[in-house]
Amino acid sequence: MSAPIVSVENVVRTYRLGKSEVQALRGVSLEIHPGEFLAVAGPSGSGKTTLLNLVGCVDTPTSGVVRVDGRDTSALSERALTDLRLRRIGFIFQSFNLVAVLSVFQNVEFPLLLQGEATRKEREQRVLALLDAVGLREHARHRPSELSGGQRQRVAVARALVGRPRLVLADEPTANLDSTTGATIIDLMRDLNRRDGTTFLFSTHDQKVMSHAHAVVRIADGQLQARETLNPAA
Amino acid sequence: MLPATGKVKVLLRIALRNLAAGRARTAIIGTILLVGTLLVVVGSSLVESVDRGMRSSIQGSLGGQLQVYDARSKDELALYGGMGREPLLEPIVDFSRVKAELEKVPNVKRVIPMGIDQALVATGNQIDVALERLRADVRRLEAGEDDPELRRRYQAHQAHVRRMVTLLRDDLRSARALADDELLRERKRDGDDLARAASDDFWAGFERDRLAGLEFLENRIAPQGMEGGMTYVRYVGTDLDAFMEAFDRAHVVEGERVPSGHRGILLGKWYAEEYLKIKNARRLDKIKDARDFQRRRIANDEELRRWVKENTNQLSEIQMQLDPLQAEEAAARLRRGLGSEERDLSRLLVALFSTTDADFEKKYRLFYDELAPLLQLYKIRIGDTITIKAPSRSGYYSSVNVKVYGFVEFRGLEKSRLAGVMSLLDLMTWRDLYGYLTKEKAEEVRALRDQVGARQVPRESAEADLFGGGGPAVETQRAGRIDEAALLAGIARPARTQDLAAQTYSQEEIDRGVALNAALILRDPSRIGATIQDVERASRRAGLGLKVVDWQKASGLVGQSVTMFRIVLYTAVLIIFAVALVIINNAMVMATLQRVREIGTMRAIGAQRRFVTAMLLVETAAVSLLFGLLGAVLGAAALWAVRAWGGIPATNDQLYFFFSGPALLPALGTTGVAVSLGLVLVVSMLSGFYPAIIAMKVTPVEAMAADD
């Protein structure tokens, strides 16, 4: 097996809540390999989001090591972490989090502009190809407010993938969608996973959504249970 | 480079679209900034224009670029008068030295001696004029001439005097009704005299002894007509030729220049209009001005209606001037002009002065074309010799007779009191009035003083010297007496008026003597600051003990008014921009807090901190620049409109001076535009600073938060 994109070793993450300390993760270890389509499942407050934040380099562990793309995130500066997010990770949020004043096209293009490497022409090709892939090409000029929730989340998927990340993180991507739409979003993600080999890690507490994943890691009280393989990677 | 511009573009796009999205917020911020820049652009352009106007007014009429005066002076030089009085300046005893030394300074083109003061001037007396005419007739009759024409004139002039006496008696009677006992006693004899002069007996007796009758009228009646016959005149004693050359705004509008080296005075034209002209004519002029330049109308203007009313009520000034023959002629002309059948002159005059907007122009012309030629419009005529009385340095009144050569006016400042009230007097006459004579005289006085052992007591040590130290007080007393004698000698001079008027003075005589201050005209007027230092150095080197000030400082309170305007303006601007800063800051903080998740998202997907701070700053900068520029453009447009409309009219004489003309044509000041845009940028950066810090502190984790 190839080297993992993400390796989490014995990670503890505590938060200070007033005077007391809350242990969100109590010694978690996990490896994510290229091409995986992995779900993290657990009730709210179980530490799902904390785990995703650590993997997504928006947070660093209190102890233990998180490696993303081979680099120890605790050892990186804020700027380096941001750069790592920009170039290696795509994000899909529970509330879609599109920039309201930008059009669908511009929202998708945004990470490319931040990366500042692609020319205008390249950017256009990439954005339009992804809008095709998520089926929103004819909505390129619309504003997010003109779209339905499912459409918005598809824009978010396109935006997460446009920078060619090695890993896409999705925190409860279907929580704000009805179950049918949620299922199509997960299908879309899995299609893209299959097509390009992009690694996905998403959290959910929805049994149906979970069933679409290749594998599920269950989390409860800040500790991981065993990994269950559902559908072997294609 | 292309990708980087993409980033800048998206920053701008987000900023502008956010501005468009938050319309209410943008409108509020925009309005404040717009008003702020508009105020700065318009305000500073106005102030700069007024500054230019004043600079031109002061430099061109009296100030020059620099002024020098004795550094020991108690007061500061104030060319346009200080607080209620003329400033007390130590005299420059020998102006010729100052001139010689300062003309050596490379940038100094001319040095003009000056001495500014106020004095009383007798404005003549209508009875004197009438009596003079009568005396001329009497003289010819007494000499044995006799013809019907002379008889007719004699009768008319007699009737004129008699009517004046009657008018004076009536005046006194109405004054009596209001007066207290003391005044009544004082004026008892006056009243008796007037009663006698008004009686038929007196005029019957006049035919028997004309000269005795005239004597009585001249000695007892004429002085009673003197009331209001004295007025103040403000003058600058100067080297008239040099002055007229240096201040090319000054020009003689009526009469002629005082011949080189002669004594003489040029009265300020405005002063003549305001103080010497027949009041009715002056009021007509003022109504015309108000109608023509301020677009005011008699029908709806309280003040104009008052002037019209005063003109119809106060006819005696005109009537007093007209002897029966002239009165008849005037009545005939008015009948013709007004198309009236009226016989009575007063009624005709009332009809003439009862003007409405409809007939004003016609009646104005009628007055000046038909009536004015019969009148002496000004109390002092060109060619008259007037008597000026001024308190000299030691408190004695000196008085001199000096010939009026003409009226002087400053171009562009015709209606300004500050400039126009000033008359130009030759330096020699001024020295007589001032109490000092030439340098030789001053030295003579000093020599006399030395001879009797008197000494100058320095102000600082006066007390010790006079009361505590060795110098006994007696000496000072003696010094006082000598001074007096010297000054009395000076006063004695005007007795030889005729000699003086004919006497001419060389440039050397004019220069060698006292002056109070001197105006310096510079070759390069823009180098005022550097030249002040050069002049100071020259003064120190030659031991002249001069204080050097620029035109603005020299003009006293007047010059400071621009500084005042500026302070007021910039205070207002400061307040507006402070308010703008608070409001913009507040609005942007709110906007930033509303956008925490959006900012968190950007941070999560890879935007660096400086990107989000830049986004906020670009947003404030964009709104500021946009509305700042708009404000500046509107300001420029407003200024353009004001100019296109003929400028801001100078509605009073002070504004006339500040504007240096009848209207202020404000020019767009580049400083104003630069300052306003600079201020806008500073304010936007400052007010965007805190929101930007908030944005910077937003962590990507915020993006993960679920919807509320």
Image (tube, rainbow, N blue to C red):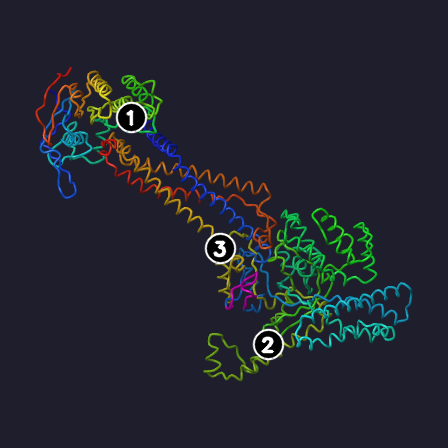
**Tag 2 near tag 1, CB within 8 Å:** no
Outermost residue toward the top in this view: A234
Chain letter for the residue marked with disc 2 in the picture: B
Q: Secondary structure at mark 2?
A: helix
In the image, residue B380 sits, relative to residue B211, either above or below, namely above
- Badge 3 marks a residue whose secondary structure is helix
* Residue B684: x %, y % from top left: 37, 41
How busy is the neighbourhood of tag 2: few (under 14 within 10 Å), some, or many (20 plus)?
some
**Relative to B202, is A42 above or below?**
above
Q: Secondary structure at mark 1?
A: helix
**Prevalent SS, magenta region:** loop
Say which of B681 and B160 sits in front.
B160
Amino acid at pointer 3: Met
The answer to whether residue B323 is left or right of residue B662 is right
Q: Residue at x 23, y 31 (%)?
A: B706
Cα gap from disc 3 to disc 2, whole angstroms: 45 Å
Q: Chain of mark 3?
A: B
**Amino acid under label 2?**
Val
Q: How many marks?
A: 3
> What residue would you read off at disc 3?
B564
Q: From the image, tell me which residue sits under label 1.
A: A112
Judge from the rendering whether residue B556 lies leftward or rightward of residue A143; answer left or right.
right
Q: Residue B445: give its label.
A: 2
Is residue A43 on the magenta stretch? no
Give residue B84's position: percent from left, percent from top: 56, 65
| Disc marking residue A209 | none
Stretch in magenta: B72-89
